[in-house]
């Protein structure tokens, strides 16, 4: 590395110690009906030269799908006096899907957008925009109703606001970066300093590539969503300064989102519902940012900005109550990768779904547990994950009177000896008992009707005792367990064939008592 590059890298690192500021000189200024309508204008993007303003407009009669259309991209241009002209629909890139503007990947001729939460790119060629084509980000999987995103000024970073893998709450902020070969890294969560259990949306990265603006209802604010600012403290993109509310000149009792500006412009733009003509209107505020654009030196880009990407696998699923089929919110999901035995964890969201990225392995043990439920476990293979399979876990509720069949607790034929592997399901019962200390259970053993009835009763009783001894040996108080063998007196299937008889050979437990 030459001296010039070494000095640049040194000052790049040192600059993380200073907190970039932005001064707000005015309250919100409406762009009136030139830009706004009685429909919702939820997000805004400036062209790199500042001469064109792009925004999304929802449910407008002039949208491609009419007033039911959930989003078209509109635009306005500056005239010779620097004033915005009447906005119009950018029809060549819109369709009846939900179309949202994201940003530019270059100086203004390559536009990134989303169609129903799927990324697409369009190019300005021969005076018009081309038909949007799919744009690939590995493992981009948004569960949000609306994906929000932006592109950095250098076109090498895309930030997302979405509900996806490894969320801290609902929508979180993520980053994808361009690699030296022009492909993109999979989205990486920006961490707990930025993201909360609530929503973080509409991220915007200033031209220094370290000052982040975003909208949140999870940090303390003035209204439903406020604009916050944070500074990146190192090159991991995981360490950030404590987010700062931009204050009452920008943030109101309404919803503020989609804050954006150019360094050489005296105004920043945002969407706000405060005193709007409809839902959200495009507003501007007068600013003075103390931010310097990052200097790009080609032979140091990889040292400064590229961190080697780990090979990861995306896992998603949903957790339900087996009895009611309702989703379970806040269930704990643990994924262990084999053979390294590295554990990852998350919680199910408000829809009972989970999304998680884990290191690549040979197999993945997925375990789900929740209060007042019997945990469930599954082993998933690499191939099924790569096919974007969504896992479904139906948990047995621990409610008084509910009977749970232990399908995988098996015995040697005619004996009360557990077959190897049965311990896994019994361990889930142990965990449930420890997780719910006020629960007692009643074990019942059953056989088919083959053989002498009295011997079947005795065999089923012995099997109950085997299970009881195992649970006690694992630390469950024996006073919380009772049981009985019923032989073949309580079949749940026909005994006419071998295939159905095996269903009658079972061990069950019934939630016998829950202390009030």
Image (cartoon, helix red, strand yellow):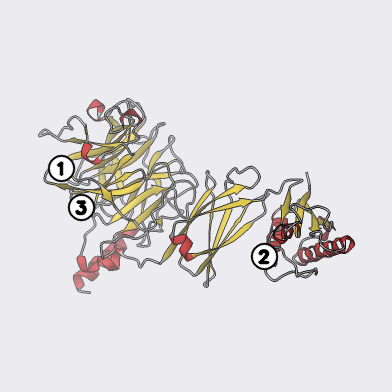
Query: Is residue 17 rendered to the left or right of residue 290?
Result: right
Residue 406 locus on image (x, y percent):
71, 58
Sequence-first disc among 1 and 3: 3
Dot 2, crowdedness within 10 Å: few (<14), some or many (≥20)? Answer: few
Of circles 1 and 3, the one toward us is 1
| Depth order, front residue of 72/417 | 417
Query: Is residue 432 rendered to the left or right of residue 225?
Result: right
Residue 257 versus residue 169 in the image, above or below: above
C-alpha span from label 3 to label 2: 55 Å
Residue 255 locus on image (x, y percent):
39, 34
Sequence-first disc among 3 and 2: 3
Return the residue found at the far bottom.
Answer: 1
Dot 1, crowdedness within 10 Å: few (<14), some or many (≥20)? Answer: few
Q: Quick check: marks 1 and 2 in contact, CB under 8 Å?
A: no
C-alpha span from label 1 to label 2: 62 Å
Residue 122 locus on image (x, y percent):
22, 48
Residue under label 2: 424
Secondary structure at badge 1 equals strand
C-alpha span from label 1 to label 3: 16 Å
| Depth order, front residue of 405/395 | 405
Secondary structure at badge 3 equals loop
Of circles 3 and 2, the one toward us is 2
Number of the label disc, if any, that sits on residue 80:
none
Residue under label 3: 106
Dot 3, crowdedness within 10 Å: few (<14), some or many (≥20)? Answer: some
Query: Residue at the spot x=41%, y=47% of the render?
Result: 162
Q: So how many labels did they put on this image?
A: 3
Number of the label disc, if any, that sits on residue 128:
1
Query: Residue at the spot x=54%, y=46% of the render?
Result: 352
Res. 456 in view? yes
| Depth order, front residue of 394/140 | 394
Residue 51 versus residue 375 in the image, above or below: above
């Amino acid at each position: 590395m030459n001296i010039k590059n070494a000095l640049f890298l040194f000052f790049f690192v040192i600059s993380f110690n200073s907190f970039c500021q932005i001064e707000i000189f005015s309250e919100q200024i409406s762009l009136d009906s030139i830009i706004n309508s009685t429909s919702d204008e939820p997000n805004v993007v400036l062209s790199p030269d500042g001469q064109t303003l792009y925004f999304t407009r929802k449910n407008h009669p002039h949208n491609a799908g009419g007033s039911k259309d959930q989003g078209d991209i509109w635009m306005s241009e500056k005239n010779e006096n620097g004033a915005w002209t009447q906005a119009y629909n950018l029809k060549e890139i819109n369709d009846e899907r939900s179309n949202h503007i994201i940003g530019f990947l270059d100086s203004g001729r390559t536009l990134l957008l989303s169609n129903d939460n799927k990324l697409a790119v369009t190019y300005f060629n021969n005076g018009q925009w081309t038909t949007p084509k799919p744009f690939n980000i590995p493992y981009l999987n948004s569960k949000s109703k609306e994906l929000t995103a932006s592109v950095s000024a250098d076109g090498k970073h895309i930030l997302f606001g979405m509900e996806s893998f490894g969320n801290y709450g609902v929508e979180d902020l993520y980053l994808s970066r361009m690699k030296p070969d022009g492909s993109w890294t999979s989205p990486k969560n920006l961490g707990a300093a930025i993201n909360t259990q609530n929503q973080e949306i509409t991220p915007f990265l200033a031209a220094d590539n370290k000052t982040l603006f975003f909208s949140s209802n999870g940090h303390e604010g003035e209204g439903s969503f406020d604009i916050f600012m944070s500074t990146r403290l190192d090159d991991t993109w995981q360490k950030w300064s404590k987010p700062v509310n931009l204050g009452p000149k920008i943030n109101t009792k309404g919803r503020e989102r989609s804050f954006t500006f150019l360094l050489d412009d005296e105004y920043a733009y945002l969407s706000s519902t405060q005193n709007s003509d409809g839902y959200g209107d495009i507003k501007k505020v007068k600013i003075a940012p103390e931010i310097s654009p990052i200097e790009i030196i080609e032979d140091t880009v990889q040292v400064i900005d590229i961190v080697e990407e780990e090979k990861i696998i995306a896992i998603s699923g949903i957790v339900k109550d087996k009895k009611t089929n309702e989703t379970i919110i806040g269930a704990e999901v643990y994924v262990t990768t084999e053979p390294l035995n590295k554990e990852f964890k998350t919680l199910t969201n408000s829809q009972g779904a989970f999304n998680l990225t884990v290191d690549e392995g040979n197999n993945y043990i997925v375990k789900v547990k929740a209060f007042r439920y019997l945990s469930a476990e599954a082993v998933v293979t690499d191939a099924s994950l790569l096919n974007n399979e969504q896992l479904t876990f139906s948990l047995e509720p621990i409610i008084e009177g509910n009977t749970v069949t232990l399908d995988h607790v098996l015995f040697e034929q005619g004996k009360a000896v557990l077959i190897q592997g049965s311990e896994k399901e019994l361990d889930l019962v142990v965990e449930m008992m420890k997780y719910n200390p006020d629960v007692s259970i009643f074990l019942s053993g059953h056989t088919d009707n083959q053989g002498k009835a009295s011997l079947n009763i005795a065999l089923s009783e012995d099997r109950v005792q085997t299970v009881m001894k195992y649970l006690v040996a694992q630390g469950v108080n024996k006073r919380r367990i009772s049981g009985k063998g019923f032989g073949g007196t309580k079949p749940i299937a026909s005994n006419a064939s071998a295939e159905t008889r095996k269903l009658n050979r079972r061990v069950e437990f019934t939630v016998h008592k829950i202390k009030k």
